[in-house]
Image: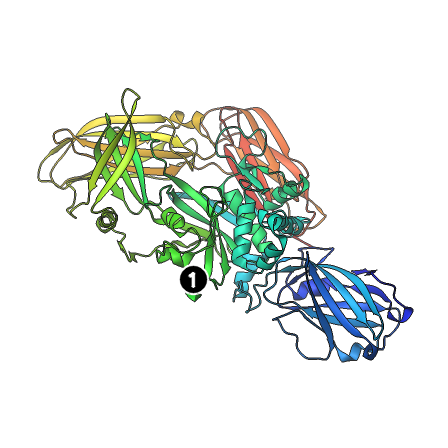
Amino acid sequence: IEHKPASISRVPDHCQLKFVNFEIHKNHIAHETVGLSTHQLVVRRGWAFQLTLIFHQPIDWSAYNFELEVQLGDLTERFPVHFSSQCLTSLRWSARVLPESLLSHSVSVHVRSPVVSAVASYHLLLHIQSQYHIFNYELGTFVLLCNPWYKDDPVFMPLEVQLQEYIQSDYGLVYVGTHQSVRQQPWAFGQYEPGVLEACLQLLQVSPQHQSDRQIDYLRRADPVYLCRVLCAMVNCNDDQGVLAGKWQGSYADGVCPTDWTGSAEILHQWLSSNYSPVRYGQCWVFACVLCTVLRVLGIPSRVVTVFNAAHDTNTNLIIEEYYSSKGQKFNLSKDSIWNFHVWVECWMRREDLGADFNGWQVVDPTPQEKSAGIYCCGPCPVSAIQRRCLHCPFDASFILASVDADVIRLIVRDGLVVGRSVDTEWVGQLIYTKSIGSDKPESLTHTYKTKMSSLGTYSSTASFGRISEQKNRHVQISFILHSLANEMALYSVHVTAPSGIVPRLEVSLDVERSPYMGDAICLCVTISNHSRHTRFLTEHLNAQLKHYNSCPHENFWKNSHQLEIQPGQVMTLHHSIPASQYKSLMAHDNIVNAAVVIKDMKTKERVMAAQEFNISSHEINIEVEGGDSIQMKKNYIVHVFYTNQFSTVLSGAVLCVEGYGLLKNKHKTRLALLQPGESIQTTVSIMASSLGTKLLQGTFSHSDSPGVVSRSFRKISVHN
């Protein structure tokens, strides 16, 4: 792309600069920035880029001094253009012209930025000075990004396959559901969509840090740690003009339900076009995926990570208390909580502020949960610091450690008294997943956060409880609010003494026999072990409640009780079935069930319990593209979409919806008044891709008998020239 430079002084004919060619196509290939912009130069710091100066006539270079100047707000730096083949330095701004081009009116200039440069949009000027005159030109602007391909950049990543996945790939997967039944949900990061680069740069410009002191902000933007903290805070709108407003319950009628988003580009476009009004609404995976897009665009390798059974520890004591009734119903009595899944971002960098031991992946969490240094952001915190349990490592190590490795104390409460307790050291952070490189399979990161041995003890039940006890002077003082039968609240304190390591006389476990689908019965298996020498007469209480992934359960929808007898040393297995009619009309989009069993010894009054959480899977929507999933840009393709009623009952008010950002201009809806068992609702749509990359075609099915979407499926479409 050529453009005529602006002259900022009167120039005689023999020094007139006619055109400037920023060699965008050539530079974008050399700098691994192809697709980020079609109209402005985007380069990476530490590498030289080329521009061509076209004069009206050849210049006697020996009669003039040539200088380039880069401007960033009020910051400016001038540097000479050397005429030699000497290599340029990456320690400061430098430029050279090859000697063979000096006799031509078209001159190629190679410019190299320092490897420690601010990520921003720069102005470039040219100054031509003779003995008596100075001629000045405004050449134009260029964008400078981090350079993970360059070894001296703090975000350098050594392997090409990693760079392709964590910088260049515009497609990802988010893992959701429960650790018992992991579901994958595609996401289009969309860094090559028009306007996304501009939105990412504008995030920095409207940040509170830039508005309060632009010069300091520009100087600090060379540091990826600083960049990550600013951008993490800007993805949520809690403290600033950030991108997303969060909402976890209630109506989403004044915005978009978080589960309806399929990519970052639409969110960033909406934020930019609305003059920085927050986009409604996001939840953890939406916040994380948008941040991942922004970091990849600006050159910081990043990936989306899901922690299953992630603890939100409000008092940072590494303990989560849960309260159950004597019949297995879970109460909402604790400020702490455990999310079935929580999604954050890992970004890659050298931690030159902490030392080589903390290089590598860093946790950055943009979901507004707790404040960090007065603002809603979290990280970057080295994953290695979490594994080593370095609680005081910046930033927010103790909060992140609790998310993946807190202990759970479950208390059974009856009439305001604790009548049973158990400690679970394995529940929190059971699985930590990210998308594998070059594959849709999950890669487990659990071992990078957690080790079998730690400096404080092992992860066995006894040793872990001993660890808690040592931290609490051999006793755990638990303050909590209990719900009495009269629905009144009173404050109690309970001393929980560390166990002696003796195997309990009565043990119970609870499992789901198979992962249920909507319309199937839920089959639960209870296993009871009698380790005593006496026959035990027991009462079994079972309870099932629906829940949202990040909150406590709602009212129970099913319960069961009966008495049984178990012989000394006997292991008894009990099977229970919950019919679909008990839950079908209550399900929301999460489809998560909390089930608990409490076993009571009728003679000794001893109580033991076990709990399990799982999701009920939805039946798939079939999406078929004629000719396959690889399509050519700006050509029409036919897509067939259908959903079959797998329920044994008629579904009324059936709606099949198809949408795809970058493929369909509008949502396509098909309605059917009644959908009989085994009958299909289907539609055919025509798609056309407007840009290259990976696109997502989404189908959703709902009906009037259910409060939300019953089924959601995606199809990954690869777009090429």
Residue drawn at x 26%, y 35% as measured from the top left: 411
Q: Residue 91 in the image: x percent, y percent?
A: 60, 71
User: Does residue 449 show up?
Assistant: yes
Q: Quadrant of residue 427?
A: top left
Residue extending furthest toward the left: 533
Tally of marks: 1
Q: 503 or 113: nearer the eye?
A: 113
Please tell me which residue is depicted at 64% across the width and 50% down the height of the picture.
205
Q: Name the amino acid, label 1.
A: Phe
Label 1, residues with CA under 10 Å away: few <14, some 14-19, many ≥20: some
67 relative to 168, above or below:
below
Q: Which of 595 and 413 is in front in this view?
A: 413
Locate residue 674 relative to residue 140 in the image: left or right.
Answer: left
* Farthest residue, direction top: 486
The x and y percentages for residue 156 are: 53, 65
Dividing the image into 4 quarters, which one contains the C terminus?
bottom right
Q: Please identify the residue farthest to the right as the structure is shown.
A: 13
Residue 440 at x, y percent in the picture: 50, 52
**Residue 573 visible in image:** no
| Above-or-below relation of 95 to 529 | below
- The residue that appears at 70% across and 65% down in the rendered structure is 27
Where residue 669 sits: x, y (%)? 62, 31
Q: Is mark 1 on a helix, strand or loop?
A: helix
Q: Name the residue under label 1.
A: 358
Question: Foreground residue, 44 or 190?
Answer: 44
Quadrant position of the N terminus in the picture: bottom right
Q: In the picture, residue 342 is in which quadrant? A: top left
**Relative to residue 458, is residue 350 drawn left or right?**
right
Q: In this view, does 558 lie above or below 367?
A: above
